[in-house]
Amino acid sequence: MTKEFYGATVEAQRRVNTLLSLPATGGEQDWEFELADPNRIGDMIKAASAELSLDEKCALALITIASIEGAVEADDVDASMIEQAKAIIKSDRDVYAAMKFYWIEQGRCSNDAATRILDQE
């Protein structure tokens, strides 16, 4: 079942900003892209073990995938981190469905990172 998902709620963004100590101003138009940081993927993976709501899990998945896309574009991909992120995202069916809708069905992928994580060809 596809879960329509068009982006993280403001509340979920705030929680992830706090959890990761992100330099958010609150004025980000494309939050996950503006705050993506390939150097923080490990922190994002660790943050997934926190007690999070579905919206917060989706926000964390968004910024993680956007950060992995940045790593792919910089040709600095850590395959083990991609596999860890993939396992975390796939472990929650609702998060997985939301990410498929957002990245694949809405065509937001800029490279193959999201498709690799979400098992699309």
Image (cartoon, rainbow, N blue to C red):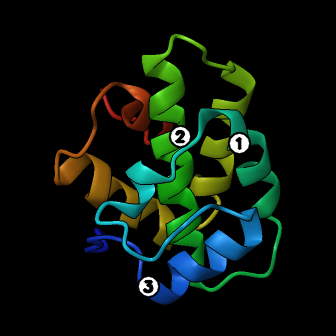
Q: Which of 53 and 36 is in front in this view?
A: 36
Q: In this rendering, is residue 91 above or below 18?
A: above
Residue 55 left/right relative to 34: right
Disc number for residue 67: 2
Mark nearer the N terminus (3 vs 2): 3
Q: Quadrant of residue 116?
A: top left
- Furthest-left residue in this view: 106
Q: In this rendering, is residue 70 above or below 47?
A: above
Disc number for residue 51: none
Pinpoint residue 48: horizontal percent, then vertical percent.
Answer: 74, 63
Pinpoint residue 102: horizontal percent, then vertical percent.
Answer: 29, 58
Quadrant showing the N terminus: bottom left
Which residue occupies 53% across, 34% down?
68
Q: Which of 83 and 25 is in front in this view?
A: 25
Task: Tell me the amino acid under the disc marked 1.
Answer: Arg
Mark 3 burial class by Cα count in 10 Å: few <14, some 14-19, many 20+:
some
Q: In this rendering, is residue 118 above or below 71?
A: below
Q: Nearer the viewer, residue 82 or 34?
A: 34
- Residue under label 3, please give it: 10
Mark nearer the N terminus (2 vs 1): 1
